[in-house]
Amino acid sequence: MDPKAIYNASKILQHKINWAKPDGREWIHVDTSDDFRDKEVLKAILAAFDVCEIYVVVDRRNVFQVRSQDALPLLREHLKHGDVTLWDKSLKKTMFFSSIGVFRYGQVAA
Protein backbone atom coordinates (compact mmCIF):
# COMPACT_ATOMS: atom_id res chain seq x y z
CA MET A 1 0.00 0.00 0.00
CA ASP A 2 1.26 3.47 -0.72
CA PRO A 3 1.73 5.98 2.16
CA LYS A 4 -1.26 8.14 1.25
CA ALA A 5 -3.61 5.12 1.19
CA ILE A 6 -2.32 3.91 4.58
CA TYR A 7 -2.68 7.40 6.05
CA ASN A 8 -6.23 7.77 4.72
CA ALA A 9 -7.22 4.31 6.00
CA SER A 10 -5.72 5.22 9.37
CA LYS A 11 -7.85 8.37 9.59
CA ILE A 12 -11.03 6.48 8.68
CA LEU A 13 -10.36 3.53 11.00
CA GLN A 14 -9.44 5.62 14.05
CA HIS A 15 -13.15 6.25 14.62
CA LYS A 16 -13.84 2.51 14.71
CA ILE A 17 -11.32 1.55 17.39
CA ASN A 18 -12.25 -0.18 20.62
CA TRP A 19 -9.65 1.41 22.90
CA ALA A 20 -8.27 -0.75 25.71
CA LYS A 21 -8.66 0.54 29.25
CA PRO A 22 -6.05 -1.11 31.44
CA ASP A 23 -6.59 -0.20 35.08
CA GLY A 24 -9.69 1.74 33.98
CA ARG A 25 -7.65 4.32 32.05
CA GLU A 26 -7.71 4.75 28.29
CA TRP A 27 -4.62 6.97 28.12
CA ILE A 28 -1.19 5.91 29.39
CA HIS A 29 1.32 8.61 30.33
CA VAL A 30 4.84 8.16 28.90
CA ASP A 31 6.15 11.72 29.11
CA THR A 32 7.92 13.69 26.38
CA SER A 33 11.42 14.47 25.10
CA ASP A 34 14.23 13.55 27.49
CA ASP A 35 11.87 11.99 30.01
CA PHE A 36 10.26 9.66 27.46
CA ARG A 37 9.81 6.20 29.00
CA ASP A 38 11.56 4.10 26.35
CA LYS A 39 11.36 0.77 28.14
CA GLU A 40 7.67 1.12 28.97
CA VAL A 41 6.81 2.17 25.41
CA LEU A 42 8.83 -0.62 23.77
CA LYS A 43 7.23 -3.17 26.11
CA ALA A 44 3.76 -1.86 25.15
CA ILE A 45 4.59 -1.95 21.42
CA LEU A 46 5.82 -5.54 21.63
CA ALA A 47 2.79 -6.56 23.69
CA ALA A 48 0.41 -4.98 21.19
CA PHE A 49 2.07 -6.20 18.00
CA ASP A 50 4.33 -9.09 19.00
CA VAL A 51 7.40 -9.16 16.76
CA CYS A 52 6.14 -8.26 13.32
CA GLU A 53 6.21 -5.60 10.65
CA ILE A 54 4.16 -2.52 11.52
CA TYR A 55 3.39 0.84 9.97
CA VAL A 56 4.52 4.05 11.63
CA VAL A 57 2.08 6.67 10.34
CA VAL A 58 3.20 10.28 10.68
CA ASP A 59 1.34 12.03 7.86
CA ARG A 60 0.19 11.35 4.32
CA ARG A 61 3.75 11.43 2.95
CA ASN A 62 5.56 9.81 5.87
CA VAL A 63 4.55 6.23 6.55
CA PHE A 64 7.30 3.80 7.46
CA GLN A 65 7.25 0.01 7.59
CA VAL A 66 9.50 -1.34 10.34
CA ARG A 67 9.76 -4.30 12.67
CA SER A 68 7.91 -3.60 15.89
CA GLN A 69 11.08 -3.88 17.98
CA ASP A 70 12.73 -1.21 15.78
CA ALA A 71 9.92 1.37 15.92
CA LEU A 72 11.03 3.27 19.03
CA PRO A 73 13.69 5.59 17.50
CA LEU A 74 11.36 6.54 14.65
CA LEU A 75 8.51 7.13 17.08
CA ARG A 76 10.61 9.36 19.32
CA GLU A 77 11.88 11.42 16.38
CA HIS A 78 8.44 12.12 14.92
CA LEU A 79 6.69 12.75 18.25
CA LYS A 80 8.78 15.91 18.51
CA HIS A 81 6.71 17.34 15.66
CA GLY A 82 3.25 15.84 16.14
CA ASP A 83 1.14 12.77 16.80
CA VAL A 84 2.14 9.31 15.54
CA THR A 85 0.03 6.21 14.97
CA LEU A 86 1.29 2.63 14.78
CA TRP A 87 -0.69 -0.03 12.90
CA ASP A 88 -0.20 -3.71 12.23
CA LYS A 89 -0.02 -4.56 8.54
CA SER A 90 -3.64 -5.74 8.44
CA LEU A 91 -4.79 -2.38 9.93
CA LYS A 92 -6.61 -4.15 12.76
CA LYS A 93 -4.47 -3.25 15.80
CA THR A 94 -3.25 0.25 16.55
CA MET A 95 -1.44 2.48 19.02
CA PHE A 96 -1.93 6.24 18.98
CA PHE A 97 0.81 8.42 20.50
CA SER A 98 0.02 12.05 21.22
CA SER A 99 2.81 14.59 21.14
CA ILE A 100 1.77 15.66 24.66
CA GLY A 101 3.21 12.43 26.13
CA VAL A 102 0.35 9.94 26.28
CA PHE A 103 -0.71 6.94 24.22
CA ARG A 104 -3.56 4.50 23.90
CA TYR A 105 -4.01 1.23 22.06
CA GLY A 106 -6.83 -0.87 20.71
CA GLN A 107 -8.21 -2.67 17.73
CA VAL A 108 -10.80 -2.09 15.04
CA ALA A 109 -14.28 -3.14 16.13
CA ALA A 110 -15.52 -6.25 14.37
Image: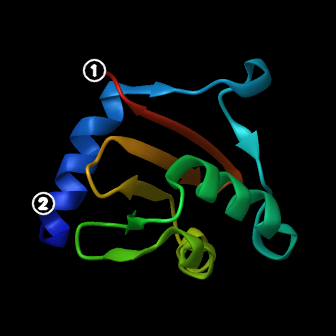
Residue 51 percent location from the top left of the image: 52, 64
Q: Amino acid at mark 2?
A: Ala
Residue 55 percent location from the top left of the image: 36, 65
Residue 26 appears left or right of 83: right
Relative vertical location of residue 81 with respect to residue 22 in this rendering, above or below: below
Residue 86 appears left or right of 77: left
Which of the 4 image quadrants contains residue 56?
bottom left
Query: Which residue is pictured at 57% across the width and 53% down the height?
Result: 97
Residues tagged 1 and 2 counted as in contact (Cβ below 8 A): no
User: Residue lying furthest right in this view?
Assistant: 35
Query: Which residue is pictured at 58% across the width and 73% down the height?
Result: 69
Between 41 and 101, the one nearer to me in the picture: 41
Way the structure is coloured = rainbow
Q: Which residue is mark 1?
A: 110
Residue 12 percent location from the top left of the image: 22, 39
Which of the 4 image quadrants contains residue 72?
bottom right
Relative vertical location of residue 25 with respect to residue 59 in this rendering, above or below: above
> Which quadrant, please, contains the N terminus?
bottom left
Disc 2 on helix, strand or loop? helix
Query: Which residue is pictured at 61% across the width and 81% down the height?
Result: 73
